[in-house]
Amino acid sequence: MPLASSPEQPLPVRTIARAIGDWISRLGRVWIEGQITQLTRRPGQSTCFLVLRDPAAEMSLQVACPRSMLDAIDPPLSEGSRVVVWAQPEFRPQRGTLSMTAYDVRPVGIGALLARLEQLRKTLAAEGLFALERKRPLPFLPGTVGLITGRASAAERDVVDNARRRWSAVQFRIENVAVQGPYAVTEIIGALQRLDADPAVDVIVVARGGGSVEDLLPFSDEALVRAVVACRAPVVAAVGHETDIPLVDHAADRRASTPTDAAKLVTPDVAEEQQRIRVLRERARRCVVNHLGTEQHRLEAIRSRPAVADPAALLDTWTVTIATARERARRATLACVADAHTDIARLGARVTALSPQATLERGYAVLQREDGQAVRDPAEVQAGESLTARVAAGRIQVQVAS
């Protein structure tokens, strides 16, 4: 329940201090993991003091533990060691300070660290942070290369010297940070955010030389991995040697086996590019020359054809052919006309021979009644009936006598 108070009835300091102490005491003993940033062993005192720091945040706690407990740990703990402490928080009302009293201190071994890192790797991979489809390509000619590395380190010299040897105009923005120890994670994350916020920085390189598993632990921190994934600019990780693969290598857009390899990844080799341009230009020249040669041969082949070489000769041939065809057609037409005249004459003679007019010309007559019907039988006419006799030269009116 919140304590009731007002400006007219304020609570005394002792009441608030006791309430804070009561609230803190309810937490009980807890297991805490952290990194030792300060270890104080004072001669003649049975109590030692540790400052445990969270590797991923600017937070620390002071822990008091028996000297005999630390002396029993082999190898001895030192600043930078990771430990798991079973401790209970205590609030001291007299001083208004919070401290932790340790009842057990255990160093985190290499095997346990590797097991935790493997579990963390699987968790982050399941979230898709290491997926290939989210990795971005590196720029061909970066305007500015952001470099995160230790101060005056060999990794910095390797990246800068090799990059400028390949491309002398390359620009760097260098962030020198702690690359191991309790402050490494927060400093690297801060450098990443500053470089990523700079629009001139096109690619970021995180470089560090080789070291032990403990030395490279900051580069497997979950907060750092997520910061790399959240970057706008592509990130190249060049941490440790070829066999060292911290988690930041999986999250980065490209992994470089060494800082020298990182310089090769982010900057093109001017000499190689110039040689490539020369090769491409020579290849293009050969293609153009070959194409022109092919077209020249094709043009010469077309020009060598008779129709193109001497068009008049072809026209003369066609003229003769057409004249011959016309003469043949003329003779065939005349022959057809002559044959038709002969046929017509023959048919005319036949028609004339079969014509009734020819019969009449021989002296015959045709008797017709008034309705134009020819008389074929005497019984068809009656006495006194008028008939018309048709002869070759005309018509004669006759009358039947009896």
Image (cartoon, helix red, strand yellow):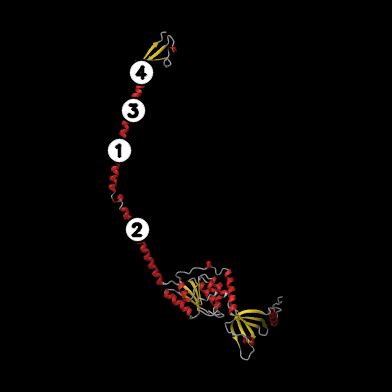
First along the sequence among labels 1 and 4: 1
- Horizontally, residue 323 falls left or right of residue 380, namely left
**Which amino acid lies under the numbered mark 2 shown in the image of this protein?**
Thr
Single out the mark in the foreground, 2 or 1. Answer: 1
Q: Residues within 10 Å of mark 4 (few under 14, many from 20)?
A: some
Q: CA distance from mark 4 to mark 3?
A: 22 Å
Q: Which mark is residue 359?
A: 4
Q: Are marks 4 and 3 in contact (CB under 8 Å)?
A: no
Residue placed most toward the observer, 46 or 401: 401
Residue 331, quarter of picture: top left
Secondary-structure class at tag 4: helix
From what the image shows, is residue 39 above or below residue 279?
Answer: below
**Which amino acid lies under the numbered mark 4 shown in the image of this protein?**
Thr
Q: Residues within 10 Å of mark 1 (few under 14, many from 20)?
A: few
Q: Which residue is mark 1?
A: 328
Q: Are marks 2 and 4 in contact (CB under 8 Å)?
A: no
Q: CA distance from mark 2 to mark 4?
A: 90 Å
Task: Give residue 35's position: percent from left, percent from top.
Answer: 59, 80
Q: Are marks 2 and 1 in contact (CB under 8 Å)?
A: no
- Horizontally, residue 89 falls left or right of residue 402, namely right
Q: Residues within 10 Å of mark 2 (few under 14, many from 20)?
A: few
First along the sequence among labels 2 and 1: 2
Secondary-structure class at tag 3: helix
Q: CA distance from mark 3 to mark 1?
A: 24 Å
Q: Which mark is residue 294?
A: 2
Task: Give residue 328's position: percent from left, percent from top.
Answer: 30, 38
Q: Work out which residue is located at the far bottom of the displayed protein and give it.
A: 44
First along the sequence among labels 2 and 3: 2
**Which amino acid lies under the numbered mark 1 shown in the image of this protein?**
Arg
Q: Which residue is mark 3?
A: 344
